[in-house]
Amino acid sequence: VNHRPLEAMVFNQLLASYERCLARYPGLTTGAVSGLLGFAGDSFAQRVEAQRAGHKLQLDGRRSFAFTAYAVGWGALGLRPWLVFLGQRMPGRSFQDVAVKVAAHQFIWNPLVYLPTFYATNGLLRGQDLTAVLEKGRKEYVGALLYIWKVWIPLSIGIFAFVPVQHQVFFNFVGNLAWNTLLSLFYNDKAVSKQLDASENTDQM
């Protein structure tokens, strides 16, 4: 039995429903989808961590809440308004327009807005004090930023060059499903913290 026509029909219906909701309730829809993908990405990351350690998965509810809450706020109040702004200021898809949007997104928005708010929100929602939040951000900032650039510069070029503005948020969400998993693994990787601590101690010798 060929299920492809049925699958295509279901996908088209879901996409149409998403676009209707996006047109009526852009902020709410963006936040809900972003939060869902944030939760999915972090949950998968926790599963990967449990498998690596040889443990049975026990979902860390506070960690999931912090990651999901940030994703909701970021999708509704950060990513969507920013992409709309870029689309309005540079609506074309010429080489120059794409280059400027990628540069603004990766070298201004991500280092100065996205990464600091991610570390602050996740740390505070997980019960860390401000000193601990700032210390973790200071140690991991450069590594996390390089990680972002490795993943998102190629994706951003493709999105800004080939995807219409009204669908750019959606395609960012698709990329975010994998990115949220990678970011959660990086943020919660104790080995990363140990390596940074060791490097810092070596520098001080």
Image: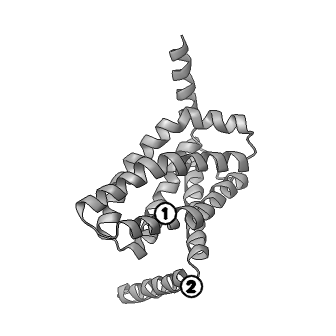
Name the spot of residue 62 as percent of width and height, x first. Answer: 72, 53
Q: Upstream in the sequence, badge 2 or badge 1?
A: 2
Name the spot of residue 173 as percent of width and height, x first. Answer: 48, 66
The mark lying in front, picked from 2 and 1, is 1
Residue that protrudes farthest toward the top in the picture: 205
Residue named by callout 2: 24
The part of the image, by quadrant, that contains residue 74 is: bottom right
Q: Is residue 199 visible?
A: yes
Relative to residue 33, is residue 165 drawn left or right? left
Residue named by callout 1: 82
> Can you say which quadrant of the picture contains the N terminus?
bottom left
The residue lying at 31 percent from left, 62 percent from top is 158
Name the spot of residue 191 as percent of width and height, x first. Answer: 55, 33
The part of the image, by quadrant, that contains residue 155 is: bottom left
Q: Secondary structure at mark 1?
A: helix
Report how far apart the C-alphas of labels 2 and 1 lie in the structure. Answer: 19 Å
